[in-house]
Image (tube, coloured by chain):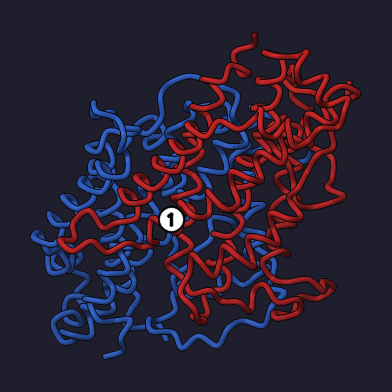
Chain colours: A blue, B red
Amino acid sequence: MRDELKLESIRSNLIRQEETIIFSMIERAQFRQNLLIYKPGGISIPGYSGNFMSFLLFETEHIHARVRRYTAPDEHPFSKDLPSPYLTPMKYDWPIKKTDININDRVLSLYINEFVPLICKQGDDGNYGSSAVCDVNILQALSKRIHYGKFVAESKFIKDEETYKTLIRSNNREKILELLTDMKIEDQVLNRVEIKASAYGQDPLSKLPHFKINPSVIKDIYLRWIIPLTKEVEVLYLMERISAN
Amino acid sequence: MRDELKLESIRSNLIRQEETIIFSMIERAQFRQNLLIYKPGGISIPGYSGNFMSFLLFETEHIHARVRRYTAPDEHPFSKDLPSPYLTPMKYDWPIKKTDININDRVLSLYINEFVPLICKQGDDGNYGSSAVCDVNILQALSKRIHYGKFVAESKFIKDEETYKTLIRSNNREKILELLTDMKIEDQVLNRVEIKASAYGQDPLSKLPHFKINPSVIKDIYLRWIIPLTKEVEVLYLMERISAN
């Protein structure tokens, strides 16, 4: 089996991504919710009718597309119709099957409607640009984590091809989800995330524990959304796995 | 005195910026030095002769300029000739005097030549885009921190106008630097940065202390560059302070 498909290697990659997600959320938490940046037309941008944060997200992805970000197997944009890279695409030997699976529309909407109110204090402090820059960092980290489900699914699939093929052919999504689920590992993830959020989200010099984000909030975001969405990507991927080239 | 010029408020702002700097350096440390991204033409981009990372930096600043980042008194771009904002500039009531002081050319060159070799392991892992995205985040954080010297200087100036005016008029930079220096506070900064780098840069679940970046490296970067450059901005600002409008 290729190294990047070994479950151990995938897990250490996902563990490393936890830092990125937690750090970026702590960064965002220093600002208020600033809901104006998520309101279409809330901050008016000539020729653009969406919200301010999405404008920054799409513009950022535009540049990143130019420097080849979305040719990598573990990167998925939020934008449609991105320009082609200035650079010759890297000759990736794709470890997973190529599919069009991309659930970032839902990630974006969940982020704005559910995560921001959990991460940030209510109110408006006028730090629109800084808040939106943090949002873009978090969204890119979430997208990577959740779509990493493709790697997880491929790894599990090739270890038990026959069972998965039978279930895929009979369209038994429920049973596939069951087979993909490892409760022990999920508990480990949740505990680890909470411990990390406590370690990173706390002023190491303060005597009283004062958290920039309550660690249980980050754990909860993993429990309610990040883990389930990753598994959803796993199921979607497997359903396309046989026909995909 | 305006709130944002109270030394206490400036210090708490600088303390908060430490997290951003440390988190972003830890993020960068996951990748190798990837020196190709700093080499002019190392990765060829049509119509651009500079290095890959600077390309990403300038393109990112281009977007941020459009959304008004560089109209804020605490933001300074690395790029020249940025476009004007799409948005009406915010009506900032500038707490400091407007000057053209911007030492980001030196920050950029120091970052590439000194910081990257200290932060990252030698070698090339092909993660060019990811490394450059981290670089941009670090550079923006460094620029903000170092140019915050303008706020520090203004705060100290208005508390002892006569002394500073005399020194400025006699062009006594050495004495100004001495007056601006508070060794006790600098020691506190260095200790705090080292403690934070230990807390954030360590896997909280690992039994053996294993640092993503050696905390003494981050302390050293503060000692050798970040603090001296901040003070240099303070002196530059004061030299322009009297004539500036």
Q: Please, is residue A31 above or below residue B115 in the view?
A: above
Q: Position of residue B20 (x, y in %)?
A: 49, 44
Residue highlighted by disc 1 = A141
Q: Which image quadrant for residue A171?
A: bottom left
Q: Is residue A49 left or right of residue A1?
A: right
Query: At 26% from the left edge and 58% from the top edge, which residue is drawn?
Result: B203
Q: Position of residue A23 (x, y in %)?
A: 39, 47
Type of amino acid at the residue the image marks with label 1: Ala
Residue that extends furthest to the right in the rendered view of this protein: B243
Q: What element does badge 1 sit on?
A: helix
Q: Which image quadrant for residue A19?
A: bottom left
Query: At 27% from the left edge and 66% from the top edge, which residue is drawn?
Result: A235
Q: Position of residue A181 (x, y in %)?
A: 14, 63
Specify the quadrant that holds the N terminus of chain A.
bottom left
Specify the quadrant that holds the C terminus of chain A.
bottom left
Depth order, front residue of B181/B52: B181
Query: At 49% from the left edge and 29% from the top edge, which residue is drawn?
Result: A31
Residue that extends furthest to the top in the rendered view of this protein: B1
Depth order, front residue of B34/A159: B34
Q: Chain of mark 1?
A: A
Q: Residues within 10 Å of mark 1 (few under 14, many from 20)?
A: some
Residue that extends furthest to the left in the rendered view of this protein: A184
